[in-house]
Image (cartoon, helix red, strand yellow):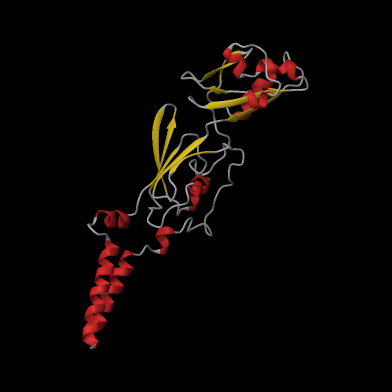
Amino acid sequence: MKLRIALMAAIAALVSGSCTSYKDIVYFQDIDNANLNPLNSEYEAVIKKDDRLTIVVSGPDKIVTAPYNLTLSELSGTGGYSSNPEQATLSYLVDVNGNIEFPILGKIHVEGMTRSQLTDYLTAEIGKDVQNPIVHVSFKNYKITVLGEVRNPGTFTFDSEKINILQALGQAGDLSLTAERDGILLLREVDGVQTHNRIDLRDSHLLDSPYFYLQQNDVIVVPPSPTRVKTATTATGIWSIILSSITTSIAVISLIIK
């Protein structure tokens, strides 16, 4: 009987040792007691080198505003302008100097501007020659990459430039139970320099940190927990060991009972 109890206790210890604790996996554990600053509802991403921007100019008279839209026919030299610039407009690539070449207006330095700032600038400049122009600026390549211990790693394109880290992780299927919550790596290019920061999803102060909202081309790397690494580096894995132990224990117990 004592041998049976000892064997069952050993099995329980193996199973419990492989389990992840509640505190290891729960997000924002201290949120009920945290003193957080108001979220920055005015957050806007800034334009960077290598961004692609879609800029559509319209107004009461589409014939007058058409020359301000970069269309396929214009680039190919066929002449004429599309009657529907919203469908025909191509994107502008921000070059290594932070500039774009805009029809009629020429070279414009857009790096460091927000989408709304560029919209206001273009509206004012075009408005010098066109009555009541309507300018719409959007990011075409607002991409976030999520790698590591998530269910669906990959690079994701978003329609909005106001994306937070939770939304990006949600797009990737959320973290697996074997992911490390307090060591998530955020790679971000700042002024041409690659930076990195560690994020703790268990800490609610992430909500008012400069890393809660993501920037275009950010890369999130979710590392595995030490338990996951240990499991992956064993020959058969801890679960194989547990199952083997359980099978052996059941066999021994059956012999004892008989």
Above or below 102: residue 215: below
Q: Quadrant of the N terminus?
A: bottom left
Can you give x and y, in whole percent of width and height, for residue 100 in the image? 55, 18
Q: Residue at x 53, y 23 (%)?
A: 111
Which quadrant is the C terminus positioned in? bottom left
Q: How many marks?
A: 0
Residue 227 appears left or right of 96 = left
Against 110, is 227 above or below? below
Q: Is residue 94 above or below residue 153?
A: above
36 on left or right of 12: right
In x, y percent, where is residue 223? Answer: 36, 48
Q: Would residue 162 be visible to someone looking at this image?
A: yes
Please state the horizontal and vertical placement of residue 104, each as a whole percent of the image.
64, 12
Would residue 1 be seen by someone viewing this image from the given angle?
Answer: no
Identify the residue shown where x is 65% and y is 20%: 122
Q: Residue at x 46, y 20 (%)?
A: 96
Tell me if residue 255 comes above or below residue 159 in the rendering. below
Q: Is residue 14 left or right of residue 173?
A: left
Give how far across and how far down residue 5 sits, in percent: 26, 82
In the rendered image, which quarter is residue 62 located in?
Answer: top right
**Which residue is drawn at the image coordinates 23% and 74% (left, top)?**
248
